[in-house]
């Protein structure tokens, strides 16, 4: 799925890049604002590497459930076509 399409489906998501792994935290740079945040590694994939891109998503349970359904449909459509 393209970045623009993901942004339409998940408007409350931030594209970030892992710029450092320090102790129990990963330092992430938010693509749109260049802000740096520290994120606990326990809430990130275990095979994380520096330079990897991540989407950070926020939302209510209802919003996230709806997004998952939309994404699942889009992926099925891509697989069928």
Image (cartoon, grey):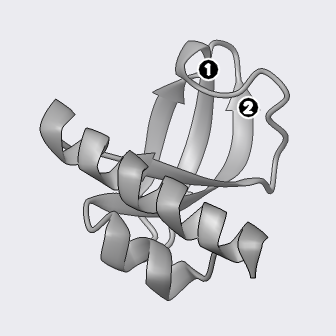
Please tell me which residue is depicted at 28% across the width and 42% down the height of the picture: 64
Tag on residue 73? none
Q: Position of residue 32 (x, y in %)?
A: 41, 77
In the structure shown, which secondary structural element does the residue marked by tag 1 occupy? helix
Tag on residue 21? 2
**Camera-side residue of 50 and 73:** 73
Q: Quadrant of residue 47?
A: top right
**Camera-side residue of 51 and 72:** 72
Please tell me which residue is depicted at 62% across the width and 32% down the height of the picture: 26
Give neighbour class at mark 1: few <14, some 14-19, many 20+ (Cα, 10 Å): some
For the C terminus, give its image quadrant. Answer: bottom right
How far is the residue under mark 2 from the one under mark 1? Answer: 8 Å
Q: Are marks 2 and 1 in contact (CB under 8 Å)?
A: yes
Q: Quadrant of residue 33?
A: bottom left
Q: Is residue 43 visible?
A: yes
Q: Earlier in the sequence, mark 2 or mark 1?
A: 2
Asked if residue 74 is positioned above or below residue 38 in the image, the reply reads: below
Image check: 22 left or right of 12? right
Residue ID for mark 1: 41
Give neighbour class at mark 2: few <14, some 14-19, many 20+ (Cα, 10 Å): some
Asked if residue 76 is positioned above or below residue 78 in the image, the reply reads: above
Q: Position of residue 37 (x, y in %)?
A: 43, 43
Furthest residue toward front: 80
Asked if residue 43 is positioned above or below residue 34 in the image, the reply reads: above
């Amino acid at each position: 799925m393209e970045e623009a399409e993901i942004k339409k489906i998940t408007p409350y998501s931030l594209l970030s890049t892992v710029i450092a792994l320090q102790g129990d935290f990963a330092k992430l740079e938010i693509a749109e604002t260049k802000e740096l945040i520290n994120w606990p590694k326990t809430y990130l994939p275990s095979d994380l590497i520096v330079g990897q891109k991540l989407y950070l998503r926020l939302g209510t349970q209802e919003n996230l459930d709806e997004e998952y359904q939309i994404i699942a449909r889009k992926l099925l459509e891509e697989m069928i076509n």
